[in-house]
Image (tube, rainbow, N blue to C red):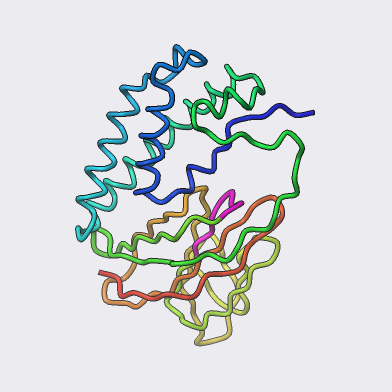
Amino acid sequence: MAKARVKLDFILLSVAPKIQFVRDRVNDMTGNANFPTPDVALAIITTAVNDLETKFNLAQGGGPAQTAAQDASEEALDDLMREEAGYVTRIADGDVVKITSAGFTATQTEPSPIAIPDKVQNLILKHGSQSGTILTTCDPVEHAKGYVTVISDNATAPITVNNGSVVLQMATAPSPIPVPAPVGQNLFLLFNASSSRKALFSGLTSGTRYYCFKYAFNSKGKGADSDVVSIVAP
């Protein structure tokens, strides 16, 4: 039987709840006899969560630079919390009571079926800090191991997704995806595959309207495409 581990679903929290979650875990682990020497000092985690809160507040109503700073701070905090969760898992050695004493949720000791991710919701496009750049993000999707973002200058581009791969039908796309096209038909297409729900596209043509959708995937397959959202590149 598999041993219980710290569940890492807190990584999927949006920024404000994540800040509160991290602070609660610092409180739970302070003076906790089960975990006397954390791999990451609680003071370091406190500094990181305070930094995220500051950058989160600046990003509210701020521009792309403030959003990028918030995203970088969030990723740094996520890395620290993954490391701390690993420490709790190692010391607890499958003891659910010890794991929960630190405020974390324990995984099931019996494997459960993995579900295909849900449809991506709340796809947001923003101008980047440089001309020709577009930032994309979305709400976290449960069970997602990664996200694919597709952007095109054609609102009705002949694109399908087969076995997790973006497939063009009778269109020409920039290298490295050359596909024969009928005379007079061209398609600009870029895609980004990442474990992050955020993606940055650069080198776009200023003043051109681009259309974007995103989907989540895991070992079971891909989730439903988000609604298509458009924006004019800066």
Residue range of the region highlighted in magenta in the rendering: 142-149
Q: Is residue 172 above or below residue 216?
A: below
The residue depicted at 73 percent of the width and 33 percent of the height is 109
The quarter of the picture where the C terminus appears is: bottom left
Residue 81 colored in magenta in the image? no
State the residue at coordinates (60%, 19%). Answer: 92
In the picture, the quarter occupied by the N terminus is top right
- The single residue placed furthest to the right in the displayed view is 1
Residue in the picture at 19% in, 58% down: 62
Quarter where residue 205 is shown: bottom left
Viewer-side residue, 29 vs 66: 29
**Left/right of residue 210 with respect to residue 196 in the rendered view:** left
Residue 108, percent across and down? 69, 37
Residue plotted at (25% across, 37% down): 51
- Horizontally, residue 219 falls left or right of residue 18, namely right
The number of callouts visible is 0
Left or right of 212: which side holds 15?
left
> Measured from the top left, where is residue 103 in percent x and y?
49, 32
Q: Nearer the viewer, residue 125 or 166?
A: 125
In this picture, is 157 found above or below 106? below
The x and y percentages for residue 72 are 33, 42
Front residue of this view, candidates 165 and 79: 79
Residue 21 on image: x %, y %: 41, 39
- 228, 129: nearer the viewer: 228
Establish if 19 lies above or below 234: above
* 33 displayed left or right of 130: right
Using the rendered view, name the quadrant where residue 179 is placed.
bottom right
Q: Residue 148 magenta-drawn?
A: yes
